[in-house]
Amino acid sequence: MSLIYKILPAAEWRAAKAAGVFEGSAVDHADGFIHFSTAGQAQETARRYFAGQADLMLLAVRTEGLGEALKWEPSRGGDLFPHLYAPLPASAVVDARVLELDAEGVPVLGL
């Protein structure tokens, strides 16, 4: 099983679980797709975009079943990042965990 990761506010995940689908965060809506990271990319994503933010979750999402809506596109430093051009079914999430912040305020992913 291949996994990709999404960092988001806990309130957004609670709402998505209740609805059965995650439609994306504000930045996802602005860009037209849901942003994800691989295990190797996720900690830098946390440092760059989520430092100092409390009450965050890390979702582990299985890529099987996302179909052609999942695209691998160049982004930061030319690395290929997973972008989902469709809502994310909550059933694709295989793990959701609360993130703690380190001494510098960066979420600790533990991947």
Image (tube, rainbow, N blue to C red):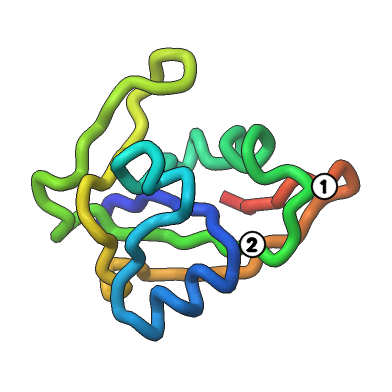
Q: Residue at x 28, y 62 (%)?
A: 88
Residue 66 pos. (x, y %)? 17, 55
Number of labels in the image equals 2
Residue 20 pos. (x, y %)? 30, 79
Report, in whole angstroms, how far the alpha carbon at label 2 lies from the one at label 1.
Answer: 12 Å
Taking the view exactly as shown, the residue that stands out farthest to the left is 68
Task: Tell me the SS state at disc 1.
Answer: loop
Residue 29 pos. (x, y %)? 37, 48
Residue of label 2: 56
Task: Tell me the SS state at disc 2.
Answer: strand
Residue in front for this viewpoint, 58 or 86: 86
Q: Residue at x 79, y 48 (%)?
A: 52
Q: Height in image: 70 above or below 110? A: above
Q: Quadrant of the N terminus?
A: bottom left
Mark seen at residue 43: none
Taking the view exactly as shown, the residue that stands out farthest to the front is 30
Residue of label 1: 105
Residue 5 pos. (x, y %)? 44, 51
Q: Residue at x 47, y 21 (%)?
A: 76
Q: Amino acid at mark 1?
A: Gly
- Dot placed on the residue nearer the N-terminal end, 2 or 1: 2
Q: Amino acid at mark 2?
A: Leu
For residue 60, what is the image quadrant?
A: bottom left
Question: Could you tell whether 35 is left or right of 49 in the image?
Answer: left
